[in-house]
Amino acid sequence: MFLPESMSRIVIVGANSCIDETIEALYDLENIHLIDHTVDADEGFTLGTPRPYSPKTAERLLKVRGMEKDLGINKHTKTQPISESEIRSQITSDSVETIQSEVQVVMDKRNDLNQRITDLNAKKKSLELLARLPIDLDMYSGYKSIVGIVGRVEKDPTQALAGMGEVFVSLNKKEGNIVAVFVKNDDRQKAQTILSEHGFNEIQVPEGTGPVKDALAAIDNELEAANKDMEVVQKEIDDLFEKHKATLRAYDEELAVEAEKGTLPIRIATSEYTFVIDAWVPENEAQKAKETIEAKVSGVYVEIEETRSRKQHESDEAEDRFKTAPTKMRHGKITKLFEYPTKMMSIPKYNEVDPTVLIAIFLPLFFGFMVGDVGYAIPFIILGAYGLKFAKNPDWRAIATVLFFGGIWAFIFGFFFFGEALGMHFIGEYKEGAVTYTWAGLLHLDNLHNFFGQFLMNTHGVGKIEAEYVGLLLRLSVYIGILHLGIGYILAIYNKTVQHGFLHGFLEKGGQFLIFIGVVLVGFALGFMLIMEGKLDEPLIFFGIDISVFWHFTNETLLAVLGAGAGFIVVGSIILAKAEGAMQILVELPDTFGIILSYTRLVAIGMSKAGMALAFNYIALGMFAGISPDPSIAGNNGIIMIILALLVFAVLQLMIWTLAILSGGLHALRLQLVEFMIRFYEGDGIEFNPLKFKHVKTISDIKVKEA
Amino acid sequence: MASAELGFIAIGAGIAVGLAGIGTGMAQKDIGAAAVGAITEDPKMLGKALMFMVLPETIVIFGLVIAILACFVLPGMA
């Protein structure tokens, strides 16, 4: 029922001449999980080589990706998909090369311009510095017996160079100091030594004549012209982007597909004239796959080798590469959303139960129980629905899933069981330490009493931090835990039964189950005998009926239960000792007790949030707004304090709400992954990964035909 | 019930939660350090790391349950 899909192994044999058609056919089927050939597994066969068209495809793909990068096309660029056959015919008529030459011309232009602008800017910078010295450009060089040294300095070198020659300095802290020194040729070395002591850094004087200011103006003109040219080129690039974005995206996708198809032969076995492909196909599609491939490709034969049963020995006896059948999980639209937590642990094995469905039931339920408040539930539902509609990232989708479905449960629990919104009961008489603020009291809505009074337990619903209900809630959480764990233990036996038969399964996993039942019975009997003296303390009025009478036990009954529990523990221990050694009993007994108690977190976390909400409501409503929890006492604070109170209320409630996501979500998940799944889950399967492509920017030919 | 007895119950509850909290903290300290390291290497580990982080919280929940029982159930029994 919960097992992954049954798999058949097929062998496809054919002549090398029809390998391309076969690969096409396999991809069209979209349900063929290829088994990689291992070297030397079959005599006379070796790994294949890439198809002859492969290098050309790879080269084109590289070109296309290069152009996409140049033009700024990426996966977020919105384009219309193009039909596959159209794209193929374009590629074969060398349109990639045509587009590339077109793009290359513009790109070369852009690169040249970029280089020119960089050069001009560098020149402009030097000229700006030189403009501060009263020297024309042509006077810096062209002398026979003297030499000009120009550059930046950190300190003024005039004094040190005094007497050596002419020194021009312009000091400016912000833009830097510039110095031009003219010395005799013989003094050059000396002058440079002195200058370097002053932090000298030479600059090249640009060629030219006349005043620096004129040269600067000329450069500015050139820069302006270059920038204008750049705008033109940028426009051309934009045009190319618009013109080719759809085709380039489609080429990218199509060529990637072809590249993968072209290298597929290196995963299969080939001889000089033939090829052999081993693959897994879902059992119920195997016959159809055989017929389709044989009909599409003449000269190819498909044999259904085996249908793998769930028995472990069958997998163990198989050849290494055929040992593990892939796991194809069977899920509907909603349970598929919960595959994420399962995969977080591991992929289920082919012959074990896929726990996703159970997680889909219990994860939101636990989350909802822990939150259990209408006021927090509604934002969860809205946020979750929004995330499920718009989020693409699998992490966010997983979180949105839990928020949405968990929110619905939180609403149900909050409305019908706890009767709470934002940590306040809807209705109830004021009672010190139990019922404080109520919505009916705050908003003066007496009608609420008539409505909620019909179904809420004991006139105001179950209070999370009310002394009377703590016992009930703790028991309830333990009962939920027992149910959850019971399913886990039964699944453990079921898994082993599927793999090895019932007797083996029971002897291996039955011991734990019996000990679990024993611990539950003993705990139940002891709890009622020692703590509750045979009955529940509080009446539970639910729809007008006191259901607490069902929890009334005589001492004899409890003793019998205790005895039965002890019996289960003894029998379970014997089976466990046989399966895993006597030491395991010492581990198992306290562990069983511990994991059952671990479910009390369902209440503990709810209580901690309810406690915070109680305190925060007192702070906001009592301290700031001056509203007494007892509605018969009128409030006495002004409007400003009420606004302030609402602000404080909002901030504090938001804090609880955020904590609810973290603690509620994580602990609900942890109960699944740790307490529940460890009972039976082994995982370590291989995910069913068929040969297929997701068409995003291209339209599959098959789809076109179907339409 | 005498207020002294109530006081002792409160102290007991406080010790139960406090010591269990210290135990959880000691366990989470090491896991947290390792988790941060793992997430730095590979941000995809965040989900798994968070899972491991909350593992020792069972200990403090046991403490909390004992405290709850002490606060709510013990006074009723006496």
Image (tube, coloured by chain):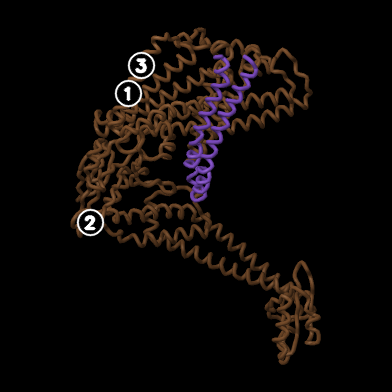
Chain colours: A brown, B purple
Q: Residues within 10 Å of mark 2 (few under 14, many from 20)?
A: few
For the residue pair B54 and A516, the one nearer the viewer reads as A516
Q: Residue at x 73, y 80 (%)?
A: A195
Tell me the CA gap for discs 2 and 1.
54 Å
Whether A463 is drawn above or below A225: the answer is above
Judged from the image, the secondary structure of the residue bearing numbered disc 3 is helix
- Residue at 26% from the left image edge and 57% from the top image edge: A47
Q: Is residue A421 visible?
A: no
The nearer-to-camera label among 3 and 2 is 3
Which label number is shown at residue A570? 1
Instruction: State the image coordinates of residue B49 (x, y, percent, origin top left).
Output: 49, 42
Q: In this rendering, do the residues under marks 2 and 1 share a single chain?
A: yes
User: In screen coordinates, is A653 left or right of A3?
Assistant: right
Q: Which mark is residue A40?
A: 2
Upstream in sequence: badge 3 or badge 1: 3
Check residue A324 in the rendering and tell me which mark sits there, or answer none: none
Q: Amino acid at mark 1?
A: Val
- Residue sitting at 38 percent across and 16 percent down? A562
- Chain identifier of the residue bearing label 3 in the image: A
Instruction: Please tell me which residue lies in front, A514 or A57.
Output: A514
**Depth check, front residue: A420 or B62:** B62
Residue B47 shown left or right of residue A233 in the figure: left
Q: CA distance from mark 3 to mark 2?
A: 63 Å
The residue tagged 3 is A563
Circle 3: residue type = Gly
Structural crowding at the residue carrying mark 3, measured as other residues with C-alpha within 10 Å and reported as few (<14), some (14–19) or many (≥20): some
Please state, as top left, top right, bottom left or bottom right, where the N terminus of chain A lies in the image.
Answer: top left
Q: Quadrant of residue A627?
A: top right
In the rendered structure, which disc, 3 or 2, sits on the residue that comes first in sequence? 2
Query: Measured from the top left, where is residue A215 in percent x and y?
Result: 72, 76
Q: Is residue A306 left or right of residue A595?
A: left
